Amino acid sequence: MKLCEHIPTEFFCEDGCTAAHRDEIASLGGRALIVTGGRSSKMNGSLDDMTDVLGKCGIAYSVFDRVEENPSVETVMAGTKAALELGADMIIGIGGGSPLDAAKAVALMAANPDRDAEFLVSGGNGYAHPLPLVCVPTTCGTGSEVTPVSVLTYHDRRTKGSVPFKIYPDIALCDGKYLMYAPHRLIVNTAVDTLGHLTESYLNSAADEHSRSAAEKGFELWQGNRPLLEGEPLTAGGCTALMTASAYGGAAIAHTGTGIPHGLSYTLTYEEHIPHGLAVGYFLAGYVSLCSDSEIHEIMGMTGFADTHEMDSFIRRTSGGTGIDRQLASLAAKRLAENPKKLSTAPFDADTAAVEKIAYSALSAD
């Protein structure tokens, strides 16, 4: 099915999703490189489910399981080498946002073996379309399974950024049972990332009826399952709902892009290794508070928070975040000020004072 009319990815979400759609997987190629991390896909069964299907379909495969959190350009090039050595004609990404984003970049680079790493930074013309790509998310935050974006770490720039290409997966396979194996803190942090996607897309200068419709569907699912993030026992249905909310968040930002909270978060993630969802969450309430009264009212209504203070308290309490120091907040604001494209996404005048106010809203309470 199509999640939204502007998303070309075929999206499926159900129990036993990988096995149920073996024919769709097999239609994409005969030699697959699986791109994943070192542990979670093995623990939650998602890797075994995929290799079982590939074996039954007679598809040769190799596993590249060296994707780190916040994958680097160097990791993508190593994965590309593995794909070329296999002669892969399709790529399968399994895991959270890091493996999925890496898989997208590998699909691009493996289709363009004459290009070097600089291609992922600067872009270029006359390149081949990425190899067919299947994405299997195992967290509830990235939305990468339905977006064209691949966010990588650029060590030479000391930050993260999107590759200058649109790489939509061909198929997204979501199965809520994989989320049941995730640590609670990981579920919360990735769900906060979803909240960021939904909020930043809805309150975006590029928002339209299509992106807001996707965001509204995501907000409904997110709010309805918020108790799971606050400690209620996980259920299969709740996990599926959180993963679907994540996909709608991905569909929303696929149209608008992310906004200022994401832009500020990259410094926190690179410099202090703060988990991505929490890094984004630190700035959400401060960002919303600068919007118009009507926009604040809409966001509070769709999230179920009484006000931005309650939103911030929820994020810090459930994610275990205590805030950041002034030096880190200042550095994040300084770097974001050098990104006019990200600043232009705000529905208000994102001048220096506004950006600093949002950045300092993440300060520790101490």
Image (spheres, rainbow, N blue to C red):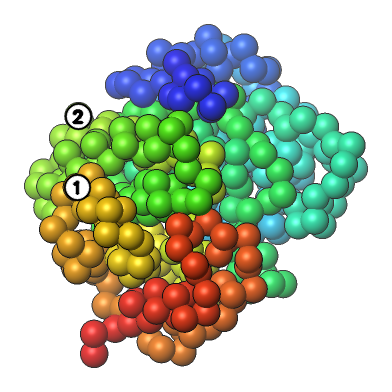
The local crowd at label 1, few if under 14, some if 14 to 19, many if 20 or more residues have their Cα within 10 Å, is some
Res 291 → quadrant: bottom left
* Whole-percent x, y for residue 258 in the image: 50, 53
| Callout 1 secondary element | helix
At horizontal 59% and vertical 75% (from top left) the residue drawn is: 337
Q: Mark 1 points at which residue?
A: 301
At horizontal 57% and vertical 24% (from top left) the residue drawn is: 8
At horizontal 29% and vertical 83% (from top left) the residue drawn is: 364
Q: Can residue 319 be seen in this view?
A: no
Separation of residues labelled 2 and 1 (CA atoms): 23 Å
At horizontal 23% and vertical 64% (from top left) the residue drawn is: 308
Q: Mark 2 points at which residue?
A: 237
Q: Can residue 322 be seen in this view?
A: yes
Which of discs 2 and 1 lies nearer the camera? The answer is 1
Location of the C terminus (image quadrant): bottom left
Residue 284 lies left or right of residue 303; in this view the side is right
Q: Height in image: 130 above or below 99?
A: above
Q: Give amino acid for label 1.
A: Gly
Comparing 226 with 41, the one in front is 226
